[in-house]
Image: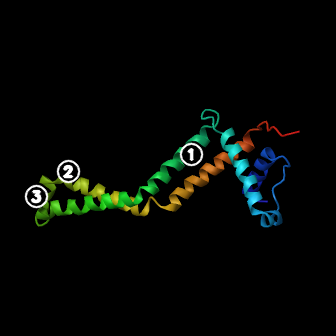
């Protein structure tokens, strides 16, 4: 059994009445039922780990994931804005391109802003990717599952 399966099994034992994950055959026979069981367990864990002070790492990973997800959603706008700034920056500096010393002396701050805009454009294109968001989502999931390994929550089960 790999570590991820071990984490999930420990989690499931803590939140499931039966303490048993559905078998592959059970999932295939009734995927809706298996999904409902998983969703219920995840909702329980999210509520259990909501305390920011007690579960600081979970909170930090959630914030990181939310930030990255939001940046990914803003990606098209970020690319358009950064590209527009680069284009207008080049147009604004075009008259100085023939005289490099004058460009550096008179338009140094503008050149710095243009350089920064080019770097931001590259970040929006190559940095704010779905893999970047996935890394944060995975870190959040690991932190959430680690709650099960480090704490022994009292799970009430119906009698």
Residue 139 position, x and y percent, is 60, 51
Residue closest to the eye, 26 or 62: 26
Q: Are marks 3 and 1 in contact (CB under 8 Å)?
A: no
Residue located at (73% from left, 40% from top): 150
* Residue picked out by circle 1: 62
Residue 97 position, x and y percent, is 14, 65
Of badges 3 and 1, the one in the foreground is 1
Of badges 1 and 2, the one in the foreground is 1
Residue located at (72% from left, 56% from top): 4
Count neighbours of disc 3 (C-alpha within 10 A) and say few if under 14, some if 14 to 19, many if 20 or more. few
Choose the circle earlier in sequence order: 3 or 1: 1
Task: Measure the alpha-carbon separation of dots 2 and 3.
Answer: 13 Å
Q: On screen, 49 above or below 134?
A: above
User: Which of the numbered marks, if any, corresponds to residue 102?
Assistant: 3
Q: Are marks 1 and 2 in contact (CB under 8 Å)?
A: no
Residue 99 position, x and y percent, is 10, 63
* Residue picked out by circle 2: 109
Count neighbours of disc 2 (C-alpha within 10 A) and say few if under 14, some if 14 to 19, many if 20 or more. few
Residue reaching furthest to the right = 159
Left or right: 93 as drawn, with respect to 71: left
Quarter of the figure that contains the N terminus:
bottom right
Choose the circle earlier in sequence order: 1 or 2: 1
């Amino acid at each position: 059994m790999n570590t991820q399966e071990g984490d999930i099994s420990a989690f499931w034992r803590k939140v499931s009445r039966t303490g048993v994950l559905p078998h592959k055959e059970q999932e295939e026979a009734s995927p809706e039922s298996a999904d409902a069981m998983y969703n219920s367990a995840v909702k329980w864990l999210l509520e259990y780990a909501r305390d920011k002070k007690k579960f600081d790492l979970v909170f930090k990973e959630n914030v990181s994931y939310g930030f990255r997800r939001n940046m990914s959603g803003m990606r098209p706008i970020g690319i358009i804005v950064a590209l527009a700034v680069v284009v207008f920056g080049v147009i604004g500096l075009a008259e100085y391109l023939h005289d490099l010393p004058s460009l550096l002396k008179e338009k140094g701050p503008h050149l710095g802003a243009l350089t920064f805009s080019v770097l931001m454009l590259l970040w929006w294109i190559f940095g704010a990717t779905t893999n970047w968001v996935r890394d944060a989502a995975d870190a959040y999931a690991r932190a959430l599952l680690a709650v099960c390994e480090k704490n022994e929550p009292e799970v009430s089960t119906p009698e």
